[in-house]
């Protein structure tokens, strides 16, 4: 990552504080970092703290006279080797999916020709909502890469998928997106893992005792060797492997549809027990 230029877009959400650690990891690896702080993001982290870590001015306003006199948003979109959106809120994802550009962050994303990596973070109900699922499918079809979200306790008191991936996982995914050297560099690997839950009624379901550990270990090992990994997992309690595109599902039908949506793949590995 040494010598690479990263633009990080910080969306609004309690998880925005993790973006500060992510910036530190990028800088430690030798990358230069420019930060775009959304209006909502500035409610959770300050421009001063972001600027102190990037060593650069923080960009916030689309209509900043000094920046835009030099077509600032165009330069920002062109100068980056990779754009990372962390946290990527439901609102930001919706705007990206529909091509909206009403602030600096979304205008930059619409104007860029650089690869884009998003790290979603939102309430579990928002993550599961049909609108978010449609937007996610559109973004994937557009070539947007994704890391996370993770499963766990949320600031709102609920539990489920929607937690921002840890900074180390986002860093690993960014490194893979930049084409970190490895014997599997440029290869797309599809992995299914974990159990599925097949509902009998609103309360009961049929499942198995698959832990998902084998699939997670294989996914992590392949990612470290440079592969782009699509990791489709049923409900598990183990942490998601770092540096992979995690697609969480519950039923066998959902897993089947997720597999179809991620094709084509150079390698497919199916690590799961059937119900």
Image (tube, rainbow, N blue to C red):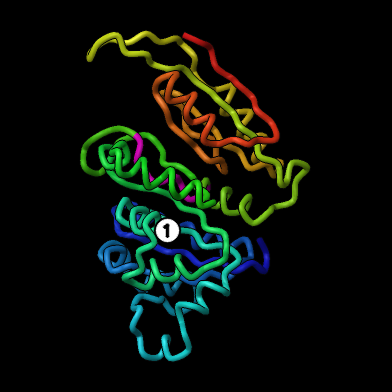
The residue labelled by disc 1 is 19
Q: Quadrant of residue 16?
A: bottom left
Q: What is the span of residues highlighted in magenta in the rendered image? A: 161-168
Position of residue 227 in the picture relative to residue 251 (left or right): right
Q: Position of residue 32 (x, y in %)?
A: 58, 70
Q: Position of residue 41 (x, y in %)?
A: 31, 63
Q: Nearer the viewer, residue 123 or 91?
A: 91
**Vertical side of 167 occupied by 250: above or below:** above
Question: Callout 1: helix, strand or loop?
Answer: helix
Q: Quadrant of the N terminus?
A: bottom right
Q: Quadrant of residue 30?
A: bottom right
Position of residue 95 in the picture relative to residue 85 (left or right): left
In this rendering, does residue 170 appear at all? no
Q: Going 69% across and 52% down the picture, which residue do you hit?
A: 180
Q: Going 49% across and 14% down the picture, which residue do you hit?
A: 210
**Vertical side of 236 occupied by 266: above or below:** below
């Amino acid at each position: 990552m040494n010598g690479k230029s990263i633009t990080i877009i910080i969306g609004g959400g309690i998880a925005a504080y993790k973006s500060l650690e992510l910036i530190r990891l990028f800088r430690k690896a030798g990358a230069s970092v420019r930060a775009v702080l959304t209006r909502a993001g500035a409610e959770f982290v300050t421009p001063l703290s972001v600027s102190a870590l990037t060593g650069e001015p923080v960009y916030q306003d689309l209509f900043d006279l000094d920046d835009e006199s030099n077509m600032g948003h165009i330069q920002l979109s062109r100068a980056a080797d990779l754009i990372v959106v962390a946290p990527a809120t439901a609102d930001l994802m919706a705007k990206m999916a529909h091509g909206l550009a009403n602030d600096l962050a979304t205008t930059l994303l619409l104007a860029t020709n650089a690869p884009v990596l998003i790290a979603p973070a939102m309430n579990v109900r928002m993550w599961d909502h049909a609108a978010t699922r449609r937007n996610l499918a559109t973004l994937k079809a557009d070539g947007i890469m994704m890391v996370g979200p993770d499963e766990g306790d949320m600031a709102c008191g609920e539990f489920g998928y929607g937690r921002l991936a840890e900074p180390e996982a986002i860093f690993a995914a960014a490194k893979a997106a930049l084409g970190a050297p490895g014997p599997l560099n440029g290869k797309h690997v599809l992995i299914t893992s974990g159990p599925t839950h097949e509902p009998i009624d609103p309360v009961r379901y049929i499942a198995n005792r698959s832990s998902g550990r084998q699939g997670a270990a294989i996914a992590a090992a392949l990612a470290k060797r440079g592969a782009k990994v699509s990791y489709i997992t049923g409900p598990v309690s183990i942490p998601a492997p770092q540096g992979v595109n995690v697609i969480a599902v519950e039923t066998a039908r959902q897993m089947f549809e997720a597999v179809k949506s991620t094709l084509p793949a150079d390698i497919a590995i199916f690590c799961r027990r059937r119900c």
